[in-house]
Image (tube, rainbow, N blue to C red):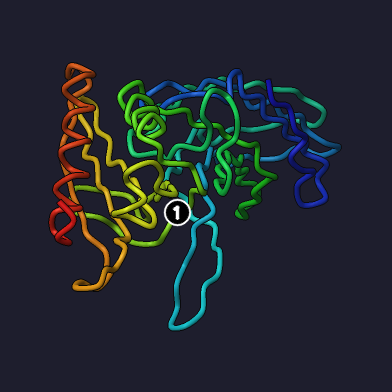
Amino acid sequence: MVFRKLMAAFGAGVEVDTVLHNSNVRPGDILRGEVNFRGGSAHQRIDGIFIDFTAKVEVESGDNEYNATYSFLHQAVAGPSELPAGDSRSVPFEIQVPWETPISAIGGHPLRGMRLGVATELSLAGALDKGDLDPLFINPLPAQEYLINALNRMGFGFKKADLERGTLRGSSMPFFQEIEYYAGHEWRRHFNELELTFIAGPQAMDVILEADNRGGFLSAGGDTYSRFTVGYGDNPAGVEQTLQNALQAMARRRGWF
């Protein structure tokens, strides 16, 4: 359970606390919690309470890079109401986690390079005040976890994960996740690094691979790509074979197979 005191708004002494019942969820799950707030010394009109899903995104601008905070879900959990002085209220909420929400934890452990959070916004007296972030840990869907484990079995070693600004084909998000790996075992002969991206939906997901290929005596290095679809009910052995085939095809394009 996560409990944070978010703010005392506009000098009115209105206090807001948000409790997430479970901050470890998967894409498509229901995030449940409650917003508790208490009036101050004066009667106030609350225009609305909102929950904001945010993420730290890497932005490239010319030769420079910087991090920016992007909101990818903004949902009202309470409409206009009157808050008498000293009165206490509690508003429960249930919000479906977007299917395309990036992974930020595996096995309940934070994924290095990822920062996702939930902020509570209180609209009071015509102004909007956003509180601190409660961390949000998005664990992979079973199909995503299987592919991640398959790459581990093939000798790819996790490097880091990040979010980059941009919208990929088939996606509605203003950014996309790249989970980066070092190549290992026999794949080290073909690739320097591999990047994995998921575009998940309710029934299936697209898997995008980008390989940084090694150069050779007769060929230059460069990036190659592969994209395939995995249904959540697909046979795991078949999914792993599809992954293996995609990696081999990417290596063949550089003349290594």
Which residue is nearer to you in this view: 70 or 76?
Answer: 70
Q: Which residue is mark 1?
A: 163
Image quadrant where one finds the N terminus:
top right
Residue 221 falls in which quadrant of the image? bottom left
| Residue drawn at (62%, 24%) of the image | 20
**Residue 27 shows in the view:** no
User: Image point 20% across, 26% down: which residue?
Assistant: 239
Amino acid type of the residue that numbered disc 1 sits on in the rendered structure: Leu
Residue 143 percent across, percent down from the top left: 30, 24
* Position in image of residue 116 (x %, y %): 55, 43
Report the front residue among 164 and 143.
143
| Neighbours of disc 1 within 10 Å: few (<14), some (14-19), many (20+) | many
On screen, residue 203 versus residue 137, left or right, reads: left
Q: Could you tell me which secondary element the residue under label 1 belongs to?
A: strand
Q: Position of residue 57 (x, y in %)?
A: 49, 57
Q: Quick check: can you spot residue 110? A: yes
Image coordinates for residue 249, horizontal then vertical, percent: 14, 48
Question: In percent of the image, x 32 and y 60: which residue is there?
Answer: 212
| Quarter occupied by residue 41 | top right
Residue drawn where x is 32% and y is 53% of the image: 189
Q: Is residue 204 above or below residue 176?
A: above
The number of discs equals 1
Furthest-bottom residue in this view: 62
105 or 222: nearer the viewer: 222
- Which residue ends up furthest to the right in the rendered image? 41
